[in-house]
Image (cartoon, grey):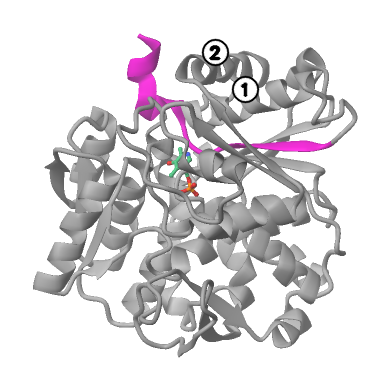
Amino acid sequence: MIESTLTHLECGMCGAVYPADQLWNLCPACARPLLARYDLARAAATLTLAALRERAPTLWRYAEVLPVRDPDHRLSLGEGWTPLVHATRLGGQIGCPNTYVKDESLNPTGSFKARGLGVAVSRAAELGARELAIPSAGNAAGALSAYAALAGLPAHVFMPADVPQPFQAECRALGAHVTLVDGLINDCGARVRAGAAEYGWFDCSTLKEPYRLEGKKTMGYELAEQLGWQLPDVIIYPTGGGTGLVGMWKAFDELQAMGLIDARRPRMVSVQATGCAPIVQAYRAGHEHAELWPGAKTVADGLRVPVAVGDFLIIRAVRASGGTALTVDDAAMIAHANLLGATTGIFAAPEGGACLAAQVALLESGWIAPDETVVLFNTGTGLKYAHLWV
Ligand SMILES: *Cc1c(COP(=O)(O)O)cnc(C)c1O
């Protein structure tokens, strides 16, 4: 049995420390995200290259650095260990031969939200949560619905009323209670908070509980492992709440503390939509926090996040890495999803197309050199956005 080495939770903003074995949302002192901390010396004793070779191809292969203590509570639909595709034809066409696509569309429920919610629901069930709730622009709702069904817990999902039909259908088929809200994801968040206060639902909003981040950080562990413990020069990430970017940055620190990688880090690129770019705006202005983006509009539902509680963690990681932040418009996302599709065989979500559009722009400006190793994230399947291609 692989043991979790979770020790405590620490606020990412004020540094306050909390015991790990009870349910928490935001830091009670400053209302910012709590981060899981581990005994990494103990984890390093068993999380070895030889041990990893024997382990199953899911994210639970990194159980020492995940929060779930009882193996029976590690819910699995086969999440994680997605392919890292060396996109040679694509790389040839755009003049960057070492271009790789981490294809997260192959996760259960068709997006990388399965990583975060697989771990968060497992841990919430372990700690005694009775009902789960989430505000979502689409993919997170489907992932919560799936893992709640697996755990046998009721799920309450709140989505903007204009979310494409496949996202709604998926939640209904998975047994969730679906509420459509006239508004954006932050309006949905207010409905979840009201339900949490009135009915005791556990709020699974991203970065408002500590463990979706832990699930998403496994993308960083996988990248390192799949590239032979050598990180790429550049990682391009489509940023909504920023959980994956912040999670990978955390993973790299943990990997280094365990002696699995050295101090070199990829430059982290945060991509947002022209119609919703609070992080890009704050980054360019030199701020540490982002302002609410009014009238957020983009076909990339995962990027339609006007306000992120972990904004400072995203911006700090981008800056510390020597990275950058830029916007891409919706037409460029679709055009580049098509280029990705026709050269790799991967039907990408517009968020995946956004990463390629950003890569092409950064190659043109010279920010990325042609001989650098670049990893793009295709964070979801294009199938749920098929309406964009009719
Ligand atoms: C949620 C989502 C994103 C944004 O992910 P964050 O880690 O919250 O920034 C990107 N792409 C897709 C397809 C998503 O569902």
Viewer-proximal residue, 165 or 180? 180
Q: Which residue of the protein is positioned furthest toward the left in this rendering?
A: 198
Residue 182, horizontal then vertical, whole percent? 14, 38
x 38%, y 65%: residue: 208
Residue 335, horizontal then vertical, whole percent? 54, 13
Residue type at tag 2: Ala
Q: Which label sits on residue 357?
A: 1
**Per the image, is 275 magenta?**
no
Q: Are marks 1 and 2 in contact (CB under 8 Å)?
A: yes
Q: Compute the Cα span from label 1 to label 2.
A: 8 Å
Residue type at tag 1: Ala
x 26%, y 59%: residue: 149
The answer to whether one can see residue 125 in this image is: yes
Please report the bounds of the magenta region as a residue range: 373-390
Left or right side of 224 for 358: left
Q: Which residue of the protein is positioned furthest toward the top in this rendering?
A: 390
Left or right side of 105 for 137: left
Q: Quadrant of residue 90?
A: top right
x 78%, y 75%: residue: 257
Q: Which residue is mark 2?
A: 335
